[in-house]
Image (tube, rainbow, N blue to C red):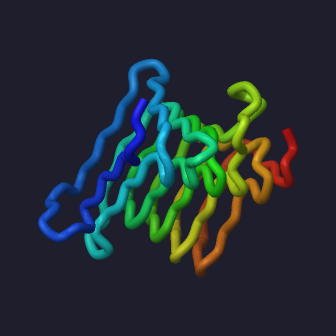
Amino acid sequence: AYTTPLVFDSSVLGQEYRDLHLIGHGKAVLQFNGTGVALKVFGNANTGVTTTMENLRIRGNANATDVLYLKNVFKSSFKNINLEEGTSVALRCEFCLSNRFESIIISGADVGQMTTRPVDGIYLDLQSTDNTFVNPIIEGVTGSGVRIVGASGPNTFIGGTAESGGAS
């Protein structure tokens, strides 16, 4: 468990990395016990950051806002990720381009009832475009399963389910 948000930020002056790999064994749990965003990945606005993230369960809490916040993330792969417990958005993407999200699960029903449910499951903003979502499962959020704003699109959704309105 950790109380300070995990932040991978290559947009800061002097940060040089362009690739980030977070690979869990089985379904590794990142349990956030602090306040704010549980996990942030921010790339440089011009070059972005390429990320591979697989086999993880990222859990927030009643004081967490977003569970996973991606900004300026390009040509990346996210697979078998469970996002749980937050007060705002489970997966926030800002200016995310040409990424593949496969088997992203945001579901109180799938993981046992979440005590703190996000308002929105997937939130695409700031021209997030050309992303592909394969078999996402979004259940039990209190707002929208998928919200697309800020001139984002086109994005592709293949299979899966996206419920809204607090259905459990």
In this view, 18 is above or below 84: below
What residue lies at 45% left-to-right and 24% top-to-bottom?
A: 28
Q: Return the x and y of residue 71 as percentages of the image width and height.
A: 42, 64
With 154 as the anchor, is 79 left or right in this view?
left
- Would you identify the image quadrant in which residue 30 lies? top left
Quick check: can you spot residue 135?
no
Q: Quadrant of the N terminus?
A: top left
What residue lies at 55% left-to-right and 40% top-to-bottom?
A: 60
Q: Quadrant of the C terminus?
A: top right
With 3 as the anchor, is 65 left or right in this view?
right
In this view, 55 is above or below 122: above
- Would you identify the image quadrant in which residue 104 lies? top right
Residue that protrudes farthest toward the bottom in the picture: 151
Residue that protrudes farthest toward the top in the picture: 26
Q: Return the x and y of residue 13 as percentages of the image width and height.
A: 17, 70
Quick check: can you spot residue 11?
yes
Q: Return the x and y of residue 159 as percentages of the image width and height.
A: 71, 44
With 48 as the anchor, is 168 left or right in this view?
right
Q: Return the x and y of residue 3 as percentages of the image width and height.
A: 41, 40
Numbered circles on residues, count: 0
In this view, 161 is above or below 29: below
What residue lies at 52% left-to-right and 76% top-to-bottom?
A: 127
What residue lies at 76% left-to-right and 59% top-to-bottom?
A: 144
